[in-house]
Every structure is written in C-alpha cells, then in structure tokens.
Image (cartoon, grey):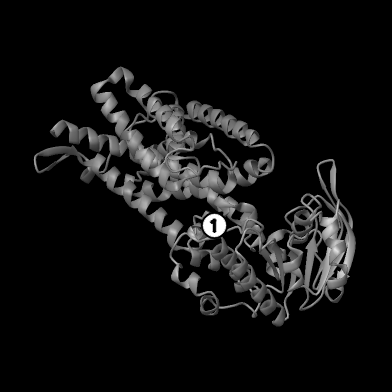
C-alpha cells in the first residue's frame, strides 16, 4: 500500500511536467493551428536556464519559478515574430519542419555551451528530504511539484473560463473565422498565446530541473511522450491535455516500478487503445479542424 | 449603406462571382435568392471580408472596405449571422452574446436581449450548442444585435426551422428594419422573403439575373420560382 502511494505521487509529479507542457502545446495548437515540435526543447531550455541562474546568480528555485517563465515568454514571442508567423498561412507541415529544425539548433547550441553531462541542481532547504504523512513517507519535492502544478493548471483554467481573454482564446480555437466575422482581432492574440505556451513549457522544465538529469537531450524523449499525451487528451483540448498528462505520468511510474522493460511502451499502448476507441482523443472534438 | 459594384470572386482558378452589383439602403431589407452553388454564400462572405480572392468594390457607409479585414468590417458595423448559425459549443449562451465587441450605441444590452428572447435568459449558463435549432438561430441574431450592427448579413436564417419559428424570425427582421438597420438576407424560401424584404435579387451562376421590387413580387413570383426550379 505504502509503495503504491509512493509510486502514485511519483507518477503524478512526473505527470505534472507533461500536464503543464501539454497545456501550452494545446493552447498554441488551438489558436495558431501550429503543432509546436520545439516544445521539448523549450522545456529543456527552462531546466537549463534554472541551472544556469542558480550557478551564475545564485538564484534559487523559488526565483527561477518566476523568472524563467518570464524569460521563456519573451523567447517565445521572439520565435513567433521572427519565424513562426511567416509560415502560419501555409500548410501546417511547414511549421512542423520549422519547429523540428529549431529543436535541433537549440539542442546543439546548449550542447556546445554546457556539454553533454548533466548540470547539477541544488534544491532549496525546505524542499529537501522526505515527509511522513500518516505512515506514508514521500519526497517533499515531489509533493511540492504536484501541488504547484495543480495550482498552475487551476489558474490557467480560471484564466480560460472566467476572463474575456479566455473567452476569446476558446472562440478562436473553436471557429477562428467566425471569431473574426464577429469583430475579434484573432491575429492580435497569436503572439502572446505562443509566448504563454512556451512559458508553460519552460515552467515545466524548471520544475523538472531538480528531478531529472539536466542535459541538452532531456527534451527529446520528453517531446515524444508529450505528443502521446496530446493525442490521448485530444489535440487542442485544454482539459484533455492536463488529465492525459497526469495519466501518462502514472502509467510511466507504475510501469517503471512493476515492468521496467515495458514502461515506455505502455504509454504508447495506452495511446493506441484510446485512439481505437476514441479517434479524436479523450476530450477531442469529433470534427478535427486543422 | 452597402454598395457592391463589379464584384468578382475566385476559388483558386474557378470564378464564383462574375461582376455582381447590389445595394442595400438604410433601413432596407434586401433578399438574395438563387439555387445552391449560384454564389449566394460567396457573395455575403465577400461582403463580410471572409473571402479575400476578389476584384471589384465593396463600399460600406461610404467607405471602401474591399481590402479591409473581417474584424474591422464587424467593428465598422456589419453584423454576421452565419448559415450554420455559428454558435460556439465551448462558450455558454451568455458568453456567445458577450463575445463580439459593442460597435455602436445602437447596441442592445443583455437585459434587452433577454427580454426579447426569454429562452436565452433561461439557458444563459448552458453551452451554446445545447439549444435547439430555432433557439440557436435566435442566439445568432441576438448576438449580432448586441453589437449594435448597422447592417446584418443573414445567411438562410429560416433553414430547417419550424414555421412558427420562421414567423418569429420574420417579426425580428421587421423589428430590425424599424430601427433603421439594413439587412442582406440570403433566402431560398422566397415566400418567406416576400414577407420581410423590400427588394429581391436573383443570383445565378455568379451573376445577378433579376432584381424586383417587393411590390411586384405577386405578379413576378412565377419568374423567381421558375429560376429556382421550384
């Protein structure tokens, strides 16, 4: 029982990274129609940025959780303005290629600068060690990651459902042309939405920094699983991205615990099963738009 | 209010409109009839700015808007009622109403909308697409009125609706006309169009082939019906 709970928390903590990153991917796909293949690289940049900030400026995790998403937002805005926007009217394949190429460039640049061995990351004191919850001993940091991510997902959900910006994002996602005919300048929201999605990937990277080996390649495998997450949740669905993120984290953790050789395969088996039953994903709309 | 002159439109190499001239005056309801594929929907999409592969001129309230993006035309006072009603399922009924920005002081308040369409008030929290077809059409029209649009572009508002609802939509169109707004109404159901329109255009293969005043409708109804193949 104790072990099962530990795996569950570990899985949900790992799932938090997927959930946050998939959320960003879903929002970007919804509004821009761009499948951002560079999302794994943005996640990696978030982790590397946290490690570099700690090393050079002695900025602790607390500060990185704030500073890195802001930096990544700026970087995302730059990428959208300089690159993505020129291809948006063309076949989605072009942006797929662009973001794939961008991933290779970013990974190589980080490799050149910081080498291939992992960067170290030191946790702030209060997050180290374990906590005993009624007999179940859990790593403090995993619990923190889980609570923090659920909090961020809830905030994004409130932003999407309770604000005018969220309403516009939902409308532009569902029927972009109609939104324009109703007087919404959809184009104005494209850049900030892209930046926001990139910031979420960066935030997932910061949270992953103390938990994973920080290397230039860390985003590669992450991106592959991330796409499984998005397919399971339903491309473009915000709720689906979050739920599928946590789900995949759980499958991964239990897989590693009980069937380590099959851990990675299990995620894709889950994906195939879900596609067989619901081709549009758990929360995807039937009429896939883009 | 709306003046379309020599409008041509293409889809890639295929030409859909071959020089269309239409006009809608202040407080005028103008109906556009034609068979499927004649170019009715293409024409309103060009007027709204949703189809951009065009030549010719679209003038709205004295301004040339031929190359103006759709959202700016909406903000200049064009109201859009899409042929499939265009209700958002990811937005509640009330959010559907609140989505478009207010563009003039003619804009209906939410209270006024709910007074005119009590069913929308009852279902305000429900997802837009849980409404019945007729209710969705009311919502689509109410949404356009809430912006304070000066000209409503309505694509087949009566399609697939029960006669009692169609009559209600007729009453709403007459109300809109009474406030001085113009309406460009695409309508296959010419008998219904005759109850609300001041003038009728008949479009065929991307050309306006007939224009008749509603006062002549009785004597020339046969011509229209023959053209429509009814």
Q: Can residue A191 be seen in this view?
A: yes
- Using residue A207 as the reference point, say whether residue B199 is left or right of it: right
- Is the residue A260 above or below the residue B221 in the image? above
Residue B174, by quadrant, is bottom right
Along the viewing direction, whichever of A169 and B3 lies nearer the viewer: B3
- Residue A187 is left or right of residue A256, and the answer is right
Residue A74 appearing in the image: no
Q: Which residue lies at the image location 55% right of the left edge and 28% below the top edge? A: A104
Q: Residue furthest top?
A: A261
Please tell me which residue is depicted at 74% across the width and 62% down the height of the picture. Answer: B187
Q: Quadrant of the C terminus of chain A?
A: top right
The residue nearer to you, when weighing A169 against A84, is A169
Q: Count the marks: how many?
A: 1
Which chain letter matches label 1? B
Q: Name the residue under label 1.
A: B88
Q: Position of residue B214 (x, y in %)?
A: 83, 74
């Amino acid at each position: 029982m104790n072990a099962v709970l530990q795996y569950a928390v570990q899985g949900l903590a790992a799932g938090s990274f997927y959930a946050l990153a998939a959320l960003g991917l879903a929002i970007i796909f919804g509004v821009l129609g761009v499948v951002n293949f560079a999302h794994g690289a943005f996640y990696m940049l978030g982790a590397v940025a946290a490690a570099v900030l700690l090393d050079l400026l002695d900025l602790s995790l607390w500060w990185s959780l704030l500073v890195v998403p802001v930096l990544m937002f700026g970087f995302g805005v730059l990428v959208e303005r300089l690159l993505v926007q020129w291809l948006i009217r063309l076949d989605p394949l072009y942006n797929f290629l662009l973001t794939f190429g961008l991933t290779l460039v970013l990974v190589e640049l980080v490799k050149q600068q910081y080498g291939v061995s992992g960067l170290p990351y030191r946790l702030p004191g209060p997050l180290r060690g374990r906590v005993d919850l009624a007999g179940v001993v859990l790593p403090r940091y995993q619990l923190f990651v889980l609570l923090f991510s659920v909090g961020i997902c809830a905030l994004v959900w409130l932003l999407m459902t309770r604000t005018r910006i969220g309403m516009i994002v939902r409308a532009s996602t569902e029927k972009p042309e109609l939104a324009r005919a109703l007087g919404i300048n959809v184009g104005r929201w494209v850049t900030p939405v892209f930046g926001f999605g990139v910031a979420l990937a960066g935030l997932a990277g910061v949270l992953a920094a103390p938990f994973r080996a920080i290397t230039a390649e860390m985003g590669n495998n992450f991106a592959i699983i991330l796409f499984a997450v998005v397919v399971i949740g339903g491309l473009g669905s915000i709720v689906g991205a979050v739920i599928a993120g946590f789900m995949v984290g759980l499958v991964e953790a239990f897989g590693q615990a009980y069937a380590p050789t099959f851990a990675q395969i299990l995620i894709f088996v889950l994906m195939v099963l879900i596609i067989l039953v619901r081709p549009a994903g758990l929360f995807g709309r039937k009429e896939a738009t883009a | 209010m709306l003046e379309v002159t020599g409008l041509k439109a293409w889809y890639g190499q295929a030409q859909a409109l071959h020089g269309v001239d239409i006009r809608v005056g202040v407080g005028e309801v103008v109906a556009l009839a034609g068979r499927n594929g004649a170019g009715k929907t293409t024409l309103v999409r060009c007027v709204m700015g949703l189809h951009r592969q065009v030549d010719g001129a679209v003038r709205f309230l004295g301004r040339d808007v031929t190359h103006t993006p759709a959202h700016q035309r909406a903000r200049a006072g064009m109201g859009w009622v899409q042929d499939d009603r265009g209700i958002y399922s990811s937005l509640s009924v009330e959010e559907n109403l609140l989505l478009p920005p207010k563009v003039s002081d003619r804009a209906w308040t939410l209270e006024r909308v709910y007074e005119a369409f009590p069913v929308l008030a009852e279902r305000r929290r429900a997802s837009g697409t849980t409404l019945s077809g007729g209710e969705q059409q009311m919502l689509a029209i109410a949404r356009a009125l809430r912006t304070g649009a000066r000209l409503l572009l309505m694509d087949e508002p009566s399609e697939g609706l029960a006669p009692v609802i169609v009559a209600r939509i007729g009453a709403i169109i007459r109300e809109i006309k009474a406030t001085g707004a113009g309406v460009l109404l695409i309508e296959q159901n010419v008998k219904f169009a005759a109850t609300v329109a001041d003038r009728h255009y008949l479009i065929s293969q991307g050309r306006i082939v007939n224009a008749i005043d509603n006062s002549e409708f009785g004597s020339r109804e046969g011509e229209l019906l023959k053209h429509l193949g009814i």
